[in-house]
Amino acid sequence: MRQGIGILALLAVCSGLSPCDAASQTATTAEGLQALKRGDYTGAVRTLSPLARDGDSSALRGLFYAHYETGALDEAEAAARQGVASRTPGAEALLGRILMDRGQLQEARTALQAAAEDQTPGGAQARLNLGILEYTYGDREQAYQLFDSFIDYYNQSRRLGYEDLATVGAAMVYLSRRVPDLAHDALRALDEAEAAGARDHRARLATGRLFLERYDAPQAAESFRAVLRENEEHPEALQGLAMVAQLEGGGDPQGLLGAALEGNPNLVQARVLLARTRLMGGDRQGAFDEIDKALEVNPADLEALATAAAIHHLTHDAAAYQETLGQIESLSRAPTRAYELMAELSADHRKYADAVDFGGRAVAADSTAWTGLGLMGLNQVRLGQVAAGRANLERAFSGDPFNLWFKNTLDLLDTFAEYRIIESENFRFVLHESEADLLGPYIAPLAERAWSEMSTRYGYRPPEPIRVEVYPRHADFSVRTVGLVGIGALGVSFGPALAMDSPSALGRGEFNWASTLWHEIAHSFHMGVSDNEVPRWFSEGLAVHEQRKANPNWGHQASPGFVRALAQGELRPVSELDRGFSHPRRPTEVVESYYQASLVFEVIEEDHGFPAIVRMLEAFRRGSSNEEAFRSALGVELEDFDDEFEDFLTDRFAAAIRSVGGEARGPIADLSSARAAVADAPGAFGPRMALATALYRDGQVLDAARHFETALELFPQYGGPDGPHWFLGQIREEQGQAELAAEHYRNLLALNENHYDGRKALANVLVSLGRLGQAADVMAEIPWIHPFEIDDHVQLAEMLEAQGDLAGAVAERRAVVALEPVDQANAYFLLARTLHRAGDPRGARSELLRALEIAPNYQDALELLLELRSGTGP
């Protein structure tokens, strides 16, 4: 009976309508907001629309964002206007937000000012939006006063709900740009908002954007992923991950942006970022198309206008640039973000001096524009203006001590006290003190040779000595080049300055640092001739071509992945090759694009001569596109060149295409599996190599050799460290066929610039054949791969001395000393003896005294000292 009475009583209460309707409406509003949060926008609109019409402020806010997040801006504006008409609390703030985002600034300001005095959550949101409006377009001091008011609003309120806390957190994000410590308060307020029961994802998105502003990609990514775990298609979260991918230099920003724009085609920031990615890929028209779409939504968006201005500037359209810049400056009293974006876009395209200028404009507009100041500093350091750059970075970091980019760069600059500057005629080498004595004698002559050859080839002389920084820690090199740890390159040229890994930064045989140095010096010439206008694909391909001009064995080579992509039609045409660097579709595409681009210049030089390549660089200097450069310098349409180049590749790699092109096999586990794979595909390179290798390891050397020879016929351009030439060299050497062994080792080194063991093996075989001069030539290139083995330098010194090359022998003896061997006294003595034989008694005496300081009773050293004093000897 009691249960029945309770039900009857509840029914009686509900029949009175008001309390029951209120409970039902609250429950329905909550359901609509949950639908919004999980991305069921249709369900959210269906549930929340009638409730918003009835004046439910939470329902109105949810309805507004259900339209807003999907790009239904007309519907979002209509909902806000209906809320204003029915006096729903918070409606003016929403109306001001949508009007601002559609470029109707004065109407937005009017709506927000009317609501800003209200002390409800809607009034707080209006004050935030008014502050954002003033910060972006109007009175920045008034904006900061509005943001500052949220400190008291937070401290004086007994209890704030999700919407208030999210609003406070967003205000603190802006305020932290002037008072960096308030970033902690921003995070606390946003975290409290989440804990209070988030009704949408605005707080989590604001957290992600805050981390992005501090260049903290991992934390930003986690914030955006947290949103996507609840709504896997949230457009702004996808856009946020695209920004993270861009910051980190990896991932698939274009795919993420495509997904974001599929969910919200009017997401202006995504359009702007997509324009930037298209521009990086050399698609200027595609970039303009995206900006046009962004400006259709918001003709006053400063980032869209800044991107347009930057493109005009990069394409030398001075009139359009000035017109667009005038629009920016008429819209905003302090367009700092616009200037900063133009600085970033300039740096993206290696216009570092322009980046410094635009960063300076941001600081002139607002002295607390720490990002602009930091961009000035970073790009000054890139240009080799280290002292000025450091001063600006220190000022920027003092203003924004949470910026990881600034911090990492300053930490690196602090280590410069550990480096020694060695000067030659055309270079200033910055070498770590621990390596300067070893590397200096190798790096300076090679760099000067590069300068001499390239200045003749390009008809260009850099106006100042090129600064070359060599880092023994790859992490330091990463920071130097992008400000963050993790870049995968080995060297980067900024034009007047370049940075690269030392051979100690990687393992033995992992890279050829002489080849890398030549590559980066080539970039300095390409940027100088073109005034930094050269497209990346062109400069990278030409730099690899330059490596081969310095040494035919240097530079990228064909890989199975390259041949497979060629066979399957996945290589980009030359007209789209920039995208192989900026938007790789597979992990190996960047490396494959280096090689593919280098072959372009092989073809051009063969058909048109090297001066045609210089004419193309000069065309880029004038602002020519790829198509215009091919037409003016070569008299060829790029579309026709694409076809001719495809024919060239197909012809050169015909055998490899047949043997590699269709392969997509997993690892072959054992000998029996390898036999089966070869039986199944006798003309396939991979299974043949797997069988040959398995036989070799099983001791069946003669059968292994036969299959290695077949593998060579199938893919003659393969120079991998585990390739057939390496194994055949060892097999023929073991069989006593030294000539054949030497031939295989030579062929290996012609295809692999890094193969330390192959070079050592070739030198030893040549010694066994009595060809000491050839062996010395081979050994002389070992320091370019790995200069840290004392025995290598000793062996080379003895070879050179035996041939009468005493200057070369002295250099190798000095390398031994620089490596600080256990028996340092002996190393100094041998250096002294070689100096004596080379006719340098003063140098010999100096090194002898060092030996005797360590070992005063060293008999051989004492005898040589007496010989020097008596003036006898060679």
Image: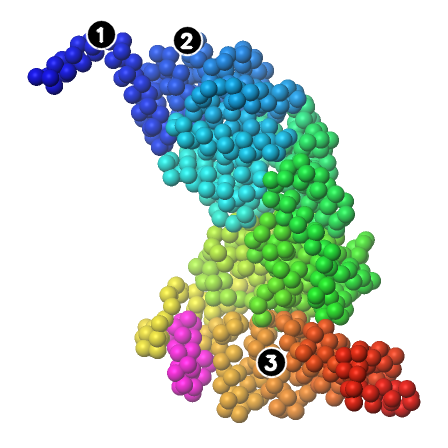
Residue 339 lies in magenta, yes or no? no
User: From what the image shows, is residue 115 above or below residue 256?
Assistant: above
The residue singled out by tag 2 in the image is: 86
SS at badge 2 = loop
Query: Horizontally, is 68 left or right of 493 in the view?
Result: left
Residue 708 lies in magenta, yes or no? yes
Residue 340 appears in the picture as rendered: yes
Q: Nearer the viewer, residue 108 or 774?
A: 108
Q: Residue at x 54, y 53 (%)?
A: 580
Q: Residue at x 53, y 83 (%)?
A: 729
* Main secondary structure of the magenta stretch: helix
Amino acid on which the number 1 mark rests in the picture: Gly
Q: Residue at x 53, y 63 (%)?
A: 649
Quarter of the picture containing the N terminus is top left
Q: Nearer the viewer, residue 652 or 13?
A: 13
SS at badge 1 = loop
Q: Nearer the viewer, residue 608 or 379?
A: 379
Q: Position of residue 400 (x, y in %)?
A: 64, 37
The residue singled out by tag 3 in the image is: 760
Q: Position of residue 332 (x, y in %)?
A: 65, 24
Residue 16 tag number: 1
The magenta segment is: 681-710
User: Nearer the N terminus, badge 1 or badge 3?
Assistant: 1
State how far apart marks 1 and 3 are (Cα): 96 Å
Residue 637 appears in the picture as rendered: no
Amino acid on which the number 3 mark rests in the picture: Lys
SS at badge 3 = helix
